[in-house]
Amino acid sequence: MNFYLYLTNQVTNLITPILSTTTSTPIESLTWYDLNLQVTQFLHTAWQMLPALTLGIVAIIICYLLARPLSYVLIKPLGFVSESKLLHVVTRRFFSIVIILFGVYLFLRLAGLTSFAVAIMSGTGLVGLILGFAFRDIAENFISSMLLSVQRPFRIDDVIEVDGRLGVVKKVTARATTLVDFDGNHIQIPNATVYKNVIKNLTANPKMRGHFTVGIGYDNDIRYAQQLAMQVVSQNPAVINDPPSQVLIESLGSATLNLTIYFWVNSSEHSTVKVASQLMRMLVNTYLAEKISMPDDARERIILNTDAEHTSHHTTSPPQTSNTLDDHSLDDISSDADDIREQADQSRDPEQGSNII
């Protein structure tokens, strides 16, 4: 009981001064004099910080203007180590960013935000975490571009196949590799994708093998048919002799014996697809002239004769061919890579032009 009375008295002694102070002193209203005093103090503080802020802004401008020339000076020793243009561009941009960030750091120090400047430059805190997630892909592509520049799996104007896309390499930047495919389209592939995927370089070795298949009847002399095919292939000036061409039996079909003709061409001068088309045309004409049968697959054909077909007979004349037609396109076996390289040089850079924003 005594403890209860003691606890009650203590609580009463604590609450009574607060209530008396609240009821006895009214809240003073904000006067114009107090407002003017606060505004004056703010302007006085801003006026005192104005020289430091001005000097900080000047430091940022100077660092921005000096970033480009200083980066060229700093990468000059790199020319004695590597001649890669990509490595020079990436390193120069890295030095430029460091110089600009140094200007930002000076501005924050002069503005009195020393701890904030240290936090930003050290990459700690929430801002560093957000930037780390935001620029993760950019950093990955940047590092991949450095590795591609060192390893050099391809060069500019090489024909490569990456991630299922075939084209001529036009440009490699710190972010992506630009290809011009054989349809004339510009394709930008991130460098991280290029580095992680299988790179098929079709220009490193100019010798490229092509092949096509033709079916002949079982009633033919197979060895003679192979000899005719080898003769046709060897007479084509675009086919090289080393490695030698081959005519092999690929499979035994239901109605034909299938021969596969393998040949080699210099891909830097001739197109494998065009040479294969020309060889197929010449081989079919040779087989027809030598009475080598090329039957179709066995199938059953049912012909239904109607009265209308007995009473009316329509004759169609074969299409008339003109000897004045230009057959240059049919005999053209030149490589398409040179045409694509020329189109890539004449085309507009995707990064040029007005900004999309």
Image: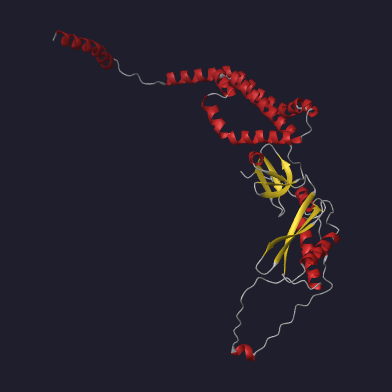
Where is residue 258? Give x, y as percent. Answer: 71, 64
Depth order, front residue of 148/228: 228
- The residue depicted at 13 percent of the width and 10 percent of the height is 1
Indicate the quadrant containing the C terminus: top left, top right, bottom left or bottom right: top right
Where is residue 31? Give x, y as percent. Answer: 40, 20
- The residue depicted at 68 percent of the width and 86 percent of the height is 314
Depth order, front residue of 339/108: 339
Residue farthest bottom in this picture: 311
Q: Is residue 151 above or below residue 205?
A: above
Q: Is residue 199 above or below residue 286?
A: above
Where is residue 293? Give x, y as percent. Answer: 75, 72
Res 86 quadrant in image: top right
Please state if 266 lies on the left or on the right of 132 as rendered.
right
Where is residue 203? Give x, y as percent. Answer: 77, 46
- The residue depicted at 50 percent of the width and 17 percent of the height is 41
Please state if 33 lies on the left or on the right of 181 as rendered.
left
User: Which colouring convention does the figure follow?
Assistant: secondary structure
- The residue depicted at 67 percent of the width and 70 percent of the height is 255
Does the rendering let one see residue 225?
yes
Res 105 quadrant in image: top right
**How many numbered discs?**
0
Please state if 107 lies on the left or on the right of 222 as rendered.
left
Res 330 quadrant in image: bottom right
Q: Is residue 187 above or below residue 212?
A: above
Residue farthest left in this picture: 1
Please state if 39 lies on the left or on the right of 311 as rendered.
left
Does the rendering let one see residue 57?
no
